[in-house]
Image (tube, grey):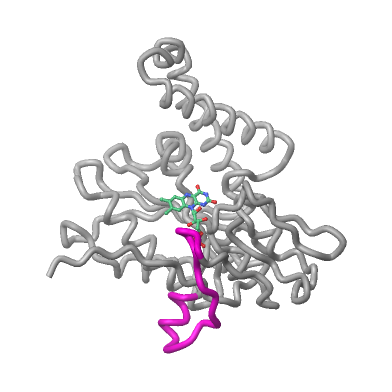
Amino acid sequence: MSVVISEACCTGCRLCEMVCPAKAIRVENKKAVVTNSRCISCGHCAAACHAGAVVSETDTPKAFIVHEPTGSPVECILQGKRSVREFLADAVPREVLEELVRYGEMAPSSRNTRGRKYYIVTGDRVTELEREVIRGLNRKVGSVKLFLPLLKIFNRKKAESLTSLGRLFASMQNAYDEGRHPVLCGAPAVICIASPVSNLQGKDDCVCSEQYLMLYAESIGLASCINGFTQIAHKEAEAYLGVDADYRIEAAVMLGYPKYLYRKYVEYKRDIVWKE
Ligand SMILES: Cc1cc2nc3c(=O)[nH]c(=O)nc-3n(C[C@H](O)[C@H](O)[C@H](O)COP(=O)(O)O)c2cc1C
């Protein structure tokens, strides 16, 4: 096990269960129980637990320490920022989304000219974008299915990983068809950031901007989470959003008001190599 939950402190509030991306925690009889084999030691449960009931086992490679965020406002934002995938239904006002882009565009860019484009998607359009992204993910895996038997012979690991991705994407399609939102998580807004295809460092430019706008979002109480799937299925997203042919979506962020707040700072072990 990588995390330990104190029975005495646990209030059974279910926050840890909600935030666990590995679905390793469930609450039974008002107490949280961890499934050891599933825990990935990400610390979401510890950061979310208001009662401070979750701690890390100390002698694992992924051990972490739990603190209250402290220091300057900037330090607190950096310590408290977590990926949020549960949003209130409230829309994010247009002027707030424009302000996010203003801060995103303050981020450095490789060509000095900040040639990024922003696509702001809101309301039902997010669900439509999600439909296209899921279609794109399944198309990507579908196009290599024919070669799977051959790949199994030459690169078994890759073949297995593609097969499990195929299953994941098919389950996303099913969830979407049932009215759930497995990719964009019901976020009221998504911002996709594109850069010119000709820019060899376009992805870096977009990721820099994404991080600036996510931190600004955090500072005004808006939650966010990177959406890598939209970037993977960028062709479908670009077609849906009408992105210019010479631009490519390199980053996408889900945004909205959070259903819960992370109260604690989870400090991970740092892997540093000095060469002095
Ligand atoms: C490149 C990248 C792609 C990601 N893509 C997704 C995604 O598609 N969906 C999602 O829910 N989270 C995505 N995330 C968020 C991570 O899952 C998240 O950072 C991780 O759960 C750790 O949580 P934390 O950011 O609160 O530390 C992505 C993160 C990165 C860096």
Q: Nearer the viewer, residue 247 or 40?
A: 40
Residue 127: % across, % down: 61, 45
Q: Is residue 151 left or right of residue 263?
A: left
Residue sitting farthest toward the right: 29
Residue 206: % across, % down: 32, 55
Q: Is residue 70 left or right of residue 14?
A: left
Picture residue at 48% right of the left edge, 25% below the top = 160
Q: Is residue 11 left or right of residue 198?
A: right
Is 215 rendered above or below residue 166?
Answer: below
Picture residue at 42% right of the left edge, 21% below the top = 156
Residue 85: % across, % down: 60, 57
The C terminus sits in image quarter: bottom left
Please state the extent of the stretch shown in magenta in the rendering: 59-79
Q: Nearer the viewer, residue 265 or 32?
A: 32
Q: Nearer the viewer, residue 20 or 104?
A: 20
The N terminus sits in image quarter: bottom right
Residue sitting farthest toward the left: 276
Q: Is residue 68 magenta?
A: yes
